[in-house]
Image: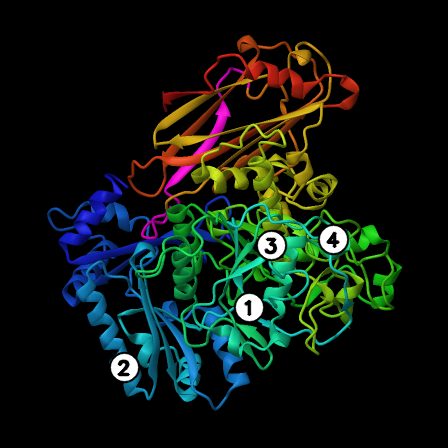
Amino acid sequence: MEGSLEDFYAQARDIGLEYLGDYEDDFEPSPDYYDQKQPEKMISGRIYLAMPSVQAIQELLSLWARYKSSQRMPNGKAQWTELFKRLMDVRPWGPQDRIPPEAITGFREDLERNPDSPQPVEIEFWFHENEAARTSAFQRVQREIVALGGRVIDHAVIPEIRYDAALVEIPARHVETLIGNRNVSLAQSDEVMFLRPQSVSKFDFKEEDSGSDGEPGATVELADNLPIAALLDGLPVQNHIRLASRLIVDDPEGLDENYPVSQREHGTEMASLIIHGDLNRGGQPLPRPLYVRPVMRPTPSGERTPAERLLVDVIYQAVRRMKVGDGDEPATAPSVVIVNLSLADDRRPFARLMSPLGRLLDYLSNEYKVLFMVSAGNILDRLPVPPFRTSAEFEAATPEERESAILLALNAHKSVRTLYSPAESVNSLTIGGAHAGSAFTGVLPADWYDPFTDGSLPNIASAMGLGFRKVIKPDLLFDGGRTPVSIVAAGDELVIAPLRRGARHFGLKAAQPSAIGGTRYEDFTWGTSVATALGTRAAHQIYDTIVDADGGSNHADADAAFMPLILKALLVHGASWGPKGDMLDQTFGPRGQGGYVARRDDITRLLGYGVPQIERVLDCAQNQATLLGYGSIRPEEALLYRIPLPGGLDGVRAYRVMTVTLAWMSPVNPRHQGYRMAALDVSSASEDKFWIAPERACQPSDKSVVRGTVFHEKRAGDLATVFNDDGYLLLRVSCRATAGLFNEAVPYALAVSFEVGVDAGIDVYEEVREALTLPVPAAVRLNA
């Protein structure tokens, strides 16, 4: 299109359009609008959203009609022709847009559970910049709700993420009408962007009792009373022997009085796993208290987020209270830099658009300098495995044959096994469950099958990526239980399903409430919530190591404002695909160089960056060294890092690995298709890219590692190379604006590691440490 988007927006304003945002979507190809090389391929496009006056929409449709009939545009409107050439259709936002397919599914499920009760419906309004316009729009819809016999339960506006929504109740018969005919009543309201079932995160009680009372671990004196990790979840059993004196519970709503101890299941599990890890592993408890803010309520069947509140506002208010205070009250835990959110909304599977809760986490991450650890979600749906037609064939196959078939089946169903909101958040670390758990002994009950051969693959129930605009998601895998499968159907094709019960055979051990009120009960659990809690624990352990000056840390005085980024970078820094990455690269298609990115993206949907080896980040072995830096950079700038190389490698043939990880929190622009405003990158500043280790390891493609807010690349090689650039590796960190103009300084953290084979006999750590004592500037600011 000739001219800039700003020109188009200006012309749109001239005819009366209020610009509300643009979003990426996919479209079916049409006979006159398709990819010439791949006619069947879905077309990626952009939807421009505007709330026009009647006169404005009439003029817009008139211009479109002129274009369709090949007429000349009026004076001053010639650029609309260039825009229209790139559009399939121009039409008002209608009922088919306001109620997406996943919303219909959710409404049906609600009606099946409570067919005669008023139904909760979440309304997302078009966001107007003008407060009076927002109020007027809400009041018009409120009158319509009342006319239907319904009521407004909650209403929240968060301008920072362009969020204006209401939670309402309407009679069941009207929801049935919406499902059967979307061209009625509320679905035609011009003020409404989306109608969806209420966003909820819930956990049902386990239907088995297979645990026992445990013995308390060694008492560890808390090193500091200031928490650096927070848990937003259910209310834990505060006097459980694993948790007593280790929690700071912030309960402003007084839930403790009406939250039966026997129902405090999920919060107790998560707190136990964060503080102690898997109790079967016998790890040391964390040396700081865990801040807990309950955001769930007890129900007859389990726990859930509040029925009378919008979930987005619940999380927004909880984080603000923690970091900056509530009204005249001071912040309750301003020292927190890690927030565990083992919550997922299974009503909101990721489907191209960023969810409001995902937008909120991205905003809060950047605004309050916190790292959210978010669970990917558990997909418990049945999975057809076509190569096998009968259970006998499945049983007769080798473990490797079953593994390969199941992985191909997961890939074939990737479109329906997507992340649950808010796991698509680009600033957060999204955690999937690895196929690993301490309870697994290699022996399973009859008719149970271990789907995979080791723990570097994902738990079969762990939701798959990618995220918004194909960002790498999940980011990491932590132990989520070695979940077995059972055969649930066998006809023309065999169907398997993950087993939800029997975690004592495959899960991880954690503190839990006792049905009879004891404070020592422990049982087994599994899933991506478990994995997320372990990820939070790992981040906490890295923090403790970094600030431990007595333990030899060189970064004990690191600026606290950069800590979330340092933790984010170091968590990812130790991750890799391992041997299963190579296996999947041979198993998945399409083949050939042309299919490289698509093939690697499909592997990334399962593995993310892989399973991190935290001990490799924390330990200082002789044959490896990790360098850590942090700073800020503005768009269109670049920083040059001069990193000393171990001199013993100069001209020596030896296996070596170099890993580079860059992490940042990007401001976001919810109005813009690009959304992520800051794109950072690491590139070589010398003639030969990363020449010390030229071959890229089996990992996400170079196209995908630059899409999100983590850049992670590993290179390996064993060829002898002669040092250039006076024995320094030159790396350029650059920044560009990708979703509108801005000139803010973007904080980042950079981790660079060298490792050589033990047989090389090179003391990498000592050589790099000595080189760092020389007075050489770490970074030089350049023009990009």
Q: Which mark is residue 144?
A: 2
Dot 3: element:
helix
The label number, if any, that marks residue 532 in the structure image: 3
Residue drawn at x 43%, y 49% as measured from the top left: 365
Instruction: Tell me which label, 2 or 4, sits earlier in the chain.
Output: 2
**Range of magenta residues:** 668-688
Look at label 2 and name its amino acid: Glu
Foreground: disc 3 or disc 4: 3
Question: Which is nearer the eye, 716 or 525?
Answer: 525
User: How much space separates mark 1 and mark 3, taking CA atoms?
Assistant: 17 Å
Query: At label 1, which amino acid type do we have?
Result: Leu
> 10 Å neighbourhood of mark 4: few (<14), some, or many (≥20)?
many
Q: Which residue is mark 4?
A: 436
Q: Main secondary structure of the magenta part?
A: loop
SS assignment at label 1: loop
Q: Quadrant of residue 764?
A: top right
Q: Please tell me how crowded label 1 is: few (under 14), some (14-19), or many (20+) other residues with Cα within 10 Å.
A: many
Circle 2 sits in a helix, a strand or a loop, which is it?
Answer: helix
Q: Is residue 278 left or right of residue 192?
A: right
User: Upstream in the sequence, badge 4 or badge 1?
Assistant: 1
State the residue position of label 1: 235
Position of residue 218 relative to residue 716, above or below, is below
Q: Nearer the viewer, mark 2 or mark 4?
A: 4
**Are the residues tagged 2 and 4 within 8 Å (C-beta)?**
no
Q: Could you tell whether 547 is left or right of 582 in the image?
A: left
Rendered view: 299 above or below 223? below
Q: Position of residue 582 (x, y in %)?
A: 72, 39
Considering only vertical position in the picture, is 252 above or below 153?
above
Q: What secondary structure is found at the residue carrying circle 4?
A: loop
Return the residue nearer the eye: 545 or 614. Answer: 545
Q: Position of residue 61 (x, y in %)?
A: 22, 61
Work out whether 294 lies above or below 658. below
